[in-house]
């Protein structure tokens, strides 16, 4: 009986350790250059949201994103205007098996593994030429979704 129990525990441990931590199919579809074509607010109107601790969410319309799937790095570039900043930010990213897109900013001289904070958005409506990233927040007690619509360059 003890041998059976040990065998079952060993098999369970092996199966748990083999659980995938990435959604490789979704990640490979994201490889390449993308542009945010629109930012949509669902659940609230007239709000102002600072996206990714960087700029107003609407400043991300027209921003350029690059994802490299084989090493989970990338970058985004804000183009800037009279009300929006410009600049490029390096990122490290992945898509979880639950379709959560997670990324963190990596600044010059930093190592990604030492950065403890980042962002998590839901990956939805993914095709070969488009996808949406949905940021769910609470504003004045109401559930709000900020939807970033991406199109392939």
Image: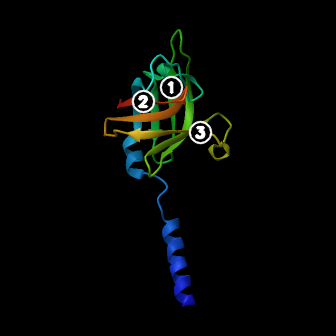
Q: Residue at x 48, y 34 (%)?
A: 135
Q: Are the two marked residues, 3 and 2, in contact with CB atoms closer than 8 angstroms?
A: no
Q: Residue at x 66, y 42 (%)?
A: 115
Which of the numbered marks, if any, corresponds to residue 118?
3
Give the crowd class for mark 3: few <14, some 14-19, many >=20 residues within 10 Å. some
Mark 3 or mark 2: name the one nearer the start of the chain.
Answer: 3
Mark 2 or mark 1: name the one nearer the start of the chain.
Answer: 1
Q: Where residue 38 sits: x, y (%)?
A: 39, 23
- Identify the coloring: rainbow
Please tell me how many numbered marks the rendered image carries: 3
Left or right: 15 as drawn, with respect to 151: right
Which of the numbered marks, if any, corresponds to residue 11?
none
Please give the residue where the numbered disc 2 appears in the rendered image. 147
Q: CA distance from mark 3 to mark 2?
A: 18 Å
Please give the residue where the numbered disc 1 appears in the rendered image. 77
Q: Furthest residue to the bottom?
A: 1
Q: Furthest residue to the left?
A: 128
Kindly report which numbered mark, 3 or 2, lies closer to the viewer in this rendering. 2
Q: CA distance from mark 2 to mark 1?
A: 18 Å
Q: Quadrant of the C terminus?
A: top left
- Residue 31 appears in view: no
User: Considering depth in this image, is 61 or 78 the residue closer to the camera?
Assistant: 61
Q: Where residue 65 sits: x, y (%)?
A: 46, 31
């Amino acid at each position: 009986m003890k041998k059976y129990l040990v065998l079952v525990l060993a098999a369970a441990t092996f199966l748990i350790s083999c659980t995938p931590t990435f959604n490789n199919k979704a990640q490979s579809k994201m490889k390449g250059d993308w542009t945010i074509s629109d930012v949509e607010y669902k659940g609230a109107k007239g709000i102002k949201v600072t996206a990714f601790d960087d700029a107003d969410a609407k400043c991300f319309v027209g921003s350029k994103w690059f994802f490299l799937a084989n090493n989970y790095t990338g970058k985004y570039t804000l183009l800037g205007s009279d009300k929006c900043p410009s600049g490029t930010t390096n990122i490290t990213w992945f898509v979880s098996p639950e379709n959560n897109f997670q990324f963190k900013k990596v600044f010059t001289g930093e190592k990604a593994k030492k950065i403890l904070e980042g962002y998590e958005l839901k990956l939805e409506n993914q095709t070969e030429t488009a996808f949406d990233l949905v940021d769910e927040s609470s504003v004045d007690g109401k559930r709000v979704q900020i939807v970033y619509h991406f199109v392939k360059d």
